[in-house]
């Protein structure tokens, strides 16, 4: 009995140590979430301005045709999948990977019909281990990613589309709604479905040269790359929100386990004391 009580006591101490770790990780993720939200909000004005300029120039250019605006027969599809480098984030990575696999299985008959551009070690390890067609990868993303961190993979994906090596491009990431809600999304990035701006922005006239076609030829790839970067920032906020929620749940579960073990420990200790008292009383009575 004494040995069993000591084991329970060690288990309680172990769970308390784990609770301290998960509680600290929750606090860290909460602070990182605030910074990630601020960074995502700070990047939106740039994306909106690029959209405004592109929409204004495209509206004033009649008969202009660009591969990024035209739908063509789909022979090969590209998927940009954004995951995290670390785990302990609940279903953050699993949800988006399942969403991508579901979309790929519904649209394609074989792996030769699509290509994957993956951001994040968890996604890279999953797809590479199972021999999926990963043609570009980025791992080791910083906590506050800059455009330079994903510039190469974004440029490669857009370039392959412009060269017609892939015929459509999808952006797959967890869209941030709140700290407790991240929604897996598979959105078509290319061809661009709409570059319309709001009514106020559309009234702005820009002077540009040499021509609308040449300006759009430069701006449209930049606009697509900006959308990819915005999705990365959104996914980063979702990651921190998912980890904060996961660590909060782990802390609560640890507290429940400690309460149950403490109750069991107290009952076992009380039973052991009662047994010892009974043995002492029985020994005293036997000597009377």
Image (spheres, rainbow, N blue to C red):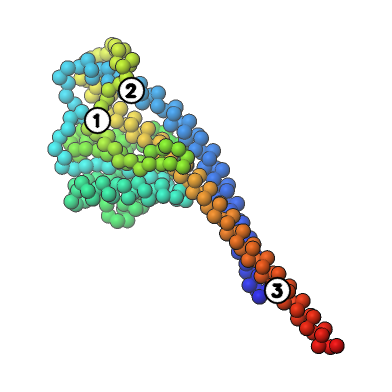
Residue 244 drawn at (x, y percent)? 50, 44
- Residue sitting nearer the eye, 100 or 227: 100
Cα–Cα span, label 1 and label 2: 14 Å
Place residue 62 in its image quadrant: top left
Q: Is residue 185 left or right of residue 275?
A: left
Marks 2 and 3 close (CB-CB < 8 Å): no
Mark 2 or mark 3: name the one nearer the start of the chain: 2
- Residue sitting nearer the eye, 12 or 145: 12
Cα–Cα span, label 3 and label 1: 74 Å
Q: Is residue 227 above or below residue 186?
A: above
Residue 192 - label: 1
Q: Nearer the viewer, mark 2 or mark 3?
A: 3
Characterize the local packing of mark 2: few (<14), some (14-19) or many (20 or more) Cα atoms within 10 angstroms. many
Instruction: Name the outermost residue toward the bottom.
Output: 287
Residue that appears at 30% across and 47% down: 100
Characterize the local packing of mark 1: few (<14), some (14-19) or many (20 or more) Cα atoms within 10 angstroms. some
Q: Is residue 176 visible?
A: yes
Mark 1 or mark 2: name the one nearer the start of the chain: 2
- Which element is circle 2 on? helix
Residue 50 - label: 2
Characterize the local packing of mark 3: few (<14), some (14-19) or many (20 or more) Cα atoms within 10 angstroms. some
Residue 191 drawn at (x, y percent)? 22, 32
Marks 3 and 1 close (CB-CB < 8 Å): no
Residue that appears at 57% across and 59% down: 257
Residue 85 drawn at (x, y percent)? 42, 47
Cα–Cα span, label 2 and label 3: 74 Å
- Residue sitting nearer the eye, 28 or 262: 262
Q: Which residue is mark 3?
A: 272
Quarter of the rendering occupied by the C terminus = bottom right
Residue 30 drawn at (x, y percent)? 53, 40
Q: Is residue 118 left or right of residue 270?
A: left
């Amino acid at each position: 009995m004494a040995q069993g009580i000591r084991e329970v006591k060690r288990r309680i101490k172990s769970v308390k140590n784990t609770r301290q770790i998960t509680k600290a990780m929750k606090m860290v993720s909460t602070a990182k979430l605030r910074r990630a939200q601020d960074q995502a909000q700070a990047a939106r004005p740039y994306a909106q301005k690029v959209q405004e300029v592109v929409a204004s120039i495209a509206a004033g250019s009649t008969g202009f045709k660009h591969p990024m605006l035209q739908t063509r027969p789909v022979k090969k599809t590209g998927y940009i999948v954004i995951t995290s480098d670390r785990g302990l984030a609940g279903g953050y990575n699993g949800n988006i990977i399942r969403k991508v696999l579901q979309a790929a299985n519904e649209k394609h008959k074989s792996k030769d019909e699509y290509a994957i551009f993956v951001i994040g070690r968890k996604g890279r390890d999953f797809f590479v281990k199972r021999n999926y067609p990963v043609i570009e990868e980025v791992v080791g993303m910083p906590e506050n990613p800059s455009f330079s961190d994903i510039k190469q993979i974004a440029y490669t994906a857009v370039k392959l589309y412009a060269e017609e090596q892939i015929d459509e491009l999808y952006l797959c990431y967890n869209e941030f709604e709140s700290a407790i809600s991240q929604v897996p999304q598979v959105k078509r990035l290319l061809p661009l479905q709409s570059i319309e701006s709001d009514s106020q922005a559309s009234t702005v006239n820009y002077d540009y040269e040499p021509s609308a076609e040449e300006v759009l030829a430069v701006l449209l790839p930049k606009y697509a790359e900006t959308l990819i970067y915005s999705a990365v920032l959104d996914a980063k906020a979702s990651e921190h929100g998912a980890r904060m929620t996961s660590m909060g749940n782990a802390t609560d579960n640890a507290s429940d386990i400690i309460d149950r073990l403490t109750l069991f420990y107290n009952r076992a200790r009380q039973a052991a004391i009662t047994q010892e008292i009974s043995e002492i009383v029985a020994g005293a009575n036997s000597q009377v």
